[in-house]
Each structure stands twice: as C-alpha cells, then as structure tokens.
Amino acid sequence: MGLDVTEAGAPPDLKVTLTSPGVYRAVVWQAAGGGMMEFYDFASDPEAKKNLAGHDRGLFEVGWHGATRLVAIAAAATRDAPAG
C-alpha cells in the first residue's frame, strides 16, 4: 500500500495531499494556516464524494482564525446575561 504525498500550487496557496490507497486522502491547505481542509474515507466512500473535513473550518484546525468566532460568542453571552 504505502503513502503517496503530492503537492499542488505555490505558496501561499500550496496544498499537500496525503493518500493511503484504499484507506484515506487528506489535503492540507497552506492558505488555511496548515489546516486539513479535505479528508476522505475510502473504506466507506470509495469515490471520495463526501469531504469529512467540512466546508468551512476543516478538520484539526490550525491557527488563530477561529478567534473571531470566540469573540462573537463572548460578546453575545455578555449582552444576554441578566442584569444584577
């Protein structure tokens, strides 16, 4: 079997694809801060139609880009807290 590693694009849009034939494919996007933005499980999806990493935040998120979401949650919690 083995592991195939390929690169596509150029910085800052480099993508590294790791494929274990018949097992999985994972794609790490440099533009996402090194996050795994694509993950396919060939055992249950041999045609790689379902990206298990999702479309917005990826799988195993790396970086600080999630901080804006935390700030919004904290602001909403403060705004909605009962007075007193």
Image (spheres, rainbow, N blue to C red):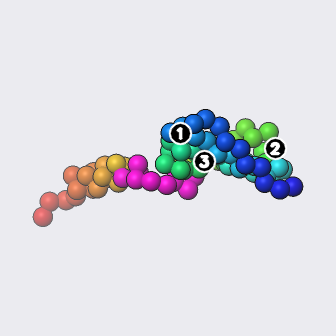
**Alpha-carbon distance for marks 2 and 3?**
20 Å
When the figure is inspected, residue 30 is found, relative to residue 3, above or below; the finding is above
Question: What x and y, as percent, mark residue 3?
Answer: 78, 54
Residue at the extreme right of the image, as rendered: 1
Instruction: Read off the magenta span.
Output: 59-67
Callout 2 crowding tier (Cα within 10 Å): few <14, some 14–19, many ≥20: some
Question: What x and y, as percent, mark residue 63?
Answer: 44, 53
Please tell me which of labels 1 and 3 falls first in the chain: 1
**Alpha-carbon distance for marks 1 and 3?**
13 Å
Which image quadrant: the C terminus?
bottom left
The residue at the point 81 percent across, 43 percent down is 46
Q: Is residue 9 visible?
A: yes
The residue at the point 53 percent across, 50 percent down is 34
The residue at the point 82 percent across, 49 percent down is 21
Q: Nearer the viewer, mark 1 or mark 3?
A: 1
Numbered circle sitting on residue 46:
2
Please tell me which of labels 1 and 2 falls first in the chain: 1
Q: Disc 3 residue type?
A: Val
Q: Which residue does the numbered mark 3 point to in the structure image?
A: 28
Q: Nearer the viewer, mark 1 or mark 2?
A: 1
Quadrant in the rendering for residue 10: top right
Tell how many labels: 3
> Is 9 a magenta residue?
no
Q: Which residue does the numbered mark 1 point to in the structure image?
A: 11
Q: Disc 2 residue type?
A: Pro
